[in-house]
Image (cartoon, rainbow, N blue to C red):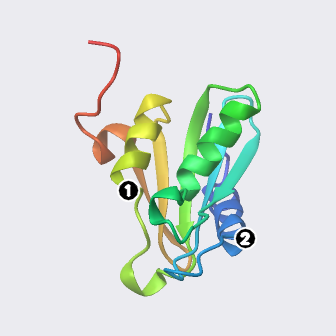
């Protein structure tokens, strides 16, 4: 399932980025997931002075969907409101594997004000680990 207008999902990701806690990097990222049931669930990055304890926006959103009892996710939009000048922000390797694990087939990444790119999960992680052969 796709939102009729990707702008709705991207706008939700941008709003989530505004809530990010990023005092160390000043790199605020938001993610918005469209579930198979049509709900939009968001997450933002939350940094910590013990850097390994930080959580990415994508992971935050995915775990929120799981915590709500859903497993089927259609699309994820990722927005960094501080990275417009560097072309946006793509999911890190860990988040690409999470996206692959839950078979989120479509990823929208904002690359600037009013611009976005759409990718499949296989494009972002071509040989991702799966339980299936």
Residue displayed at 33% across by 23% down: 130
Q: CA distance from mark 1 to mark 2?
A: 20 Å
Badge 1: how crowded within 10 Å, few (<14), some, or many (20+)? few
Q: Nearer the viewer, residue 62 or 105?
A: 62
Q: Nearer the viewer, residue 39 or 29?
A: 29
Q: Where 55 falls versus 122 (above or below)?
A: below
Q: Residue furthest left?
A: 127
First in residue order: circle 1 vs circle 2: 2
Q: Position of residue 132 (x, y in %)?
A: 33, 13
Give the residue number, with chain letter if any, for mark 1.
92
Instruction: Say whether marks 1 and 2 touch (CB < 8 Å).
Output: no
Secondary structure of residue under mark 1: loop
41 sits left or right of 53 in the view: right
Give the residue number, with chain letter if any, for mark 2.
19
Residue displayed at 55% across by 80% down: 113
Q: Position of residue 90 (x, y in %)?
A: 40, 61
Q: Residue furthest top?
A: 133
121 sits left or right of 71 in the view: left
Q: Where 51 falls versus 82 (above or below)?
A: above
Q: Where 9 falls versus 106 (above or below)?
A: below
Q: Nearer the viewer, residue 86 or 2?
A: 86
Residue displayed at 65% across by 69% down: 17
130 sits left or right of 31 in the view: left
Badge 2: how crowded within 10 Å, few (<14), some, or many (20+)? some
Q: Position of residue 71 (x, y in %)?
A: 63, 25
Quarter of the image for the C terminus: give it.
Answer: top left
Secondary structure of residue under mark 2: loop
Quarter of the image for the N terminus: give it.
Answer: top right
Q: Residue furthest front?
A: 50
Q: Position of residue 72 (x, y in %)?
A: 61, 26
Residue 84 tag number: none
């Amino acid at each position: 399932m796709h939102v009729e207008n990707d702008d709705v999902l991207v706008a939700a990701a941008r709003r989530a980025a505004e809530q990010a806690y990023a005092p160390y990097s000043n790199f605020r990222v938001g993610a918005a997931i469209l579930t198979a049931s049509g709900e939009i669930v968001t997450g933002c990055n939350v940094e910590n002075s013990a850097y390994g304890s930080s959580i990415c926006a994508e992971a935050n959103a995915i775990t929120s969907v799981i915590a709500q009892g859903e497993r089927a996710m259609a699309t994820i939009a990722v927005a960094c409101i501080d990275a417009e000048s560097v072309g946006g922000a793509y999911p890190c390797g860990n988040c690409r594997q999470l996206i692959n694990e839950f078979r989120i087939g479509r990823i929208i990444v904002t690359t600037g004000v009013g611009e976005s790119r759409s990718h499949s999960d296989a494009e972002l992680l071509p040989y991702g680990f799966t339980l299936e052969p």
